[in-house]
Each structure stands twice: as structure tokens, then as C-alpha cells.
Image: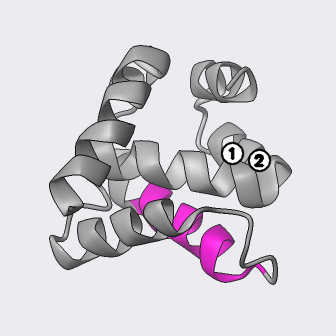
Amino acid sequence: MTASIFSKYSTYFVNKMESLNTIPVSLHKNLADKLVSVILDTENRSAISSEETKKIIYLWRQDQLASPTGIETLLNAGVKIDGEAVYKILDDLGLKEVVAEVKVL
């Protein structure tokens, strides 16, 4: 079951989020931490699906939240929860190209 969740969302984002390849690996951990904070601080628990929640938990257990797939997953969830906060985080980290691409999702 976990593999199907993983591949379903990975395929979507690989096609949609080409700018993720421009994020320096040195920023992955910091970006993942900030996105997790946005997700955990929300009071709107129904903003993301149970599938997305399961994928985040799976990636966390595998210590993969700072991987490209983890960043994709956290971005998707974060935008659904609080898009403006996510855009600000990306902008503050100098990831303007990613902001532009995330806004069109």
C-alpha cells in the first residue's frame, strides 16, 4: 500500500515540479524543517488527504523528508494548508523559480 501511495504522488510531481532540481541540496534540510512546521502548526487538519499524511509519515520514518521526494510531498501539503507561508519560506531562501512553479500547481 505504501509503495502505491509513493509512486502515485512521485509521478505527479516529477512531471510538474522541474524547478525542484534547482534547489541546492544544502537547503533541503532547512526547507523540509520549515515546511513541516507549516504542516504541523495548522488547525485545519482536513486540508490534506489521509494518503498525503501517510506518505509524510512514511517519508519521516525512512528519514527522507529532506530528499527530493520529501520536499515535493511537503511542498504539496504545505501549499494546501497555507500557500502564503510556503511562498514566503521559498522566497526567503531565494528560491523564486520554485515559488513561481508552485503557484501554478
Q: In which quarter of the image is the C terminus?
A: top right
Residue 13 location in percent, x, y?
A: 42, 29
In the depicted structure, whether residue 18 falls above or below residue 30? above
Point out residue 102 in the picture as x, y percentages from the top left corner: 65, 29
User: Which residue is at a point 63% across and 71% down the rendered structure image?
Assistant: 39
Q: Is residue 99 above or below residue 1?
A: above
Residue 61's image quarter?
Answer: bottom left
Q: Where is mark 1, residue-wise?
A: 92
Q: Name the residue under label 2.
A: 88
Residue contact between numbered discs 1 and 2, judged by CB atoms under 8 Å: yes
Name the kind of residue labelled 2 in the image.
Lys
Q: What residue appears at the point 58 percent right and 31 percent down from the top-left corner?
A: 95
- Is label 1 or label 2 in front? 2
Can I make out residue 88 in this image? yes
Is 25 covered by the magenta stretch? Answer: no
Question: Which range of residues does the magenta coloring cover?
Answer: 30-42
Q: In this view, does 24 lie to the left or right of 31?
A: left
What quarter of the picture does the N terminus occupy? bottom left
Indicate the position of residue 59 as horizontal and vertical percent values.
26, 65
Check if residue 36 falls in the magenta segment. Answer: yes
SS at mark 1 in the image = helix
Q: Describe residue 47's horizontal placement relative to residue 64 as left or right.
A: right
